[in-house]
Image: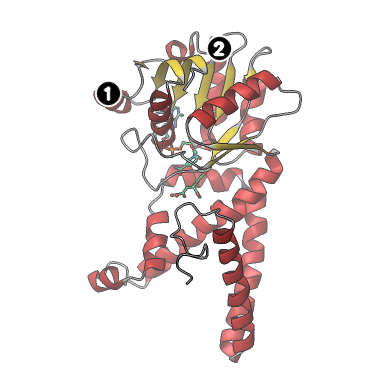
Amino acid sequence: MAQVYDRVALIGLGLIASSLFWAIKRGGLAGEVTGYARSDETRATAREIGLCDRVCDSVAEAVAGADLVVLCVPVGVMGAVAAEIAPHLAPGATVTDVGSVKADVIAQVGPHLPDGVHFIPGHPLAGTEHSGPRSGFAELFDNRWCLLVPVEGTDADAIARLRALWEGAGANVEEMDAEHHDLVLAVTSHAPHLIAYTMVGVADDLRRVTDSEVIKYSAAGFRDFTRIAASDPTMWRDVFLTNKDATLEILGRFTEELFALQRAIRTGDGDHLHAYFTRTRAIRRGIIEAGQDTDAPDFGRGARKP
Ligand SMILES: NC(=O)c1ccc[n+]([C@@H]2O[C@H](COP(=O)([O-])OP(=O)(O)OC[C@H]3O[C@@H](n4cnc5c(N)ncnc54)[C@H](O)[C@@H]3O)[C@@H](O)[C@H]2O)c1
Ligand SMILES: O=C(O)C(=O)C[C@]1(C(=O)O)C=C[C@@H](O)C=C1
């Protein structure tokens, strides 16, 4: 695969940065990748495992001469990190991020960047419940979406180059506006995480989650909740505080539906429950039939109908 950038700088060396590094190496997408992390410990780990061609002890050193800078830190500190890198950016460089929320990040980062630097916010829709420099792997973005959220008037060549990087890293790229992104992600990612956190919290309150028998016999649904609820607390605190409006909107609707289902259970309204579950099952089957769940077994595509 062809090289897209001469020098890429990764700021914050956790799951997403380390996965991007390994994907860039796999695809030969950059001449050199520099990396910066706040803590001595993370930098030492990065050096030990060969994460980045050059691990730098300052942001200034990491971004100097970079034609692409990728902010891979929690969304709550994007603005502070942008202020730190701004004086050291090369003219004509592109700055992007991988944050899970877009409108708030754009408001935080945009004002710090000097004229002549292209700012193209991004969000790869891929992750795991693990974090830190050892958690990354080159295949994370394979066949996943990466959404780019360019602000109006952004240089088309700069967007095309960033798109080529993500495609080289295995992702399918689409553009979206920030408000729409935040609403979609509130439905597909943020509210589901909050629900998983709550469900595991409720089980723990009942003192049953620590009971080894419950862990042993827990059904797949609850196990999936515990995986999601193991996700990084800093990252998710920041997601909810920065995507407040969209998340609250979706949670409001969720609560209304939950109350309606509660009432149906209390009053024995089986028709309501059956109709609701039939509707949701059709949605799942639609996703599978459209080939949009790459992790799913071949249900619904002829081989094995559920
Ligand atoms: N984990 C996911 O599933 C996932 C998926 C897509 C996007 N994202 C987004 O990617 C970004 C990074 O997430 P991650 O999963 O790689 O997290 P991570 O916890 O694995 O890594 C974050 C890194 O940022 C560093 N950091 C924190 N505050 C910093 C600061 N002020 N200055 C410099 N470095 C700082 C941390 O030390 C850590 O090394 C977040 O914005 C998150 O919303 C995460
Ligand atoms: O698979 C997981 O562990 C994830 O939660 C990844 C996930 C998601 O919700 O799909 C989490 C946050 C992101 O911003 C993007 C992806």
Q: Residue at x 45, y 58 (%)?
A: 296
Q: Position of residue 133 (x, y in %)?
A: 34, 32
Q: Residue furthest front?
A: 302
In this rendering, the answer to whether 129 lies above or below 160 is below
Q: Position of residue 193 (x, y in %)?
A: 49, 55
Q: Position of residue 167 (x, y in %)?
A: 53, 31
In the rendered image, which residue does mark 2 sit on? 89
Mark 2 lies within 8 Å of ligand 1 (Cβ measured): no
User: Quadrant of residue 259 in the image?
Assistant: bottom right
Mark 1 lies within 8 Å of ligand 1 (Cβ measured): no
Which amino acid, by three-letter code, is at mark 2? Answer: Leu
Q: Residue at x 66, y 51 (%)?
A: 246
Give neighbour class at mark 1: few <14, some 14-19, many 20+ (Cα, 10 Å).
some
Q: Earlier in the sequence, mark 1 or mark 2?
A: 1
Residue 27 visible (yes or no): yes
Give neighbour class at mark 2: few <14, some 14-19, many 20+ (Cα, 10 Å).
many
Say what secondary structure mark 1 lies in.
helix
Q: Residue at x 54, y 45 (%)?
A: 239
User: Quadrant of residue 79 in the image?
Assistant: top right
* Number of dots carrying numbers: 2
Q: Residue at x 60, y 73 (%)?
A: 258
In the rendered image, which residue does mark 1 sit on? 44
Q: Position of residue 200 (x, y in %)?
A: 40, 64
Which residue is nearer to you in this view: 195 or 98?
Answer: 98
In this rendering, the answer to whether 306 lies above or below 266 is above
Which residue is nearer to you in this view: 20 or 236?
Answer: 20
Which amino acid, by three-letter code, is at mark 1? Answer: Ala
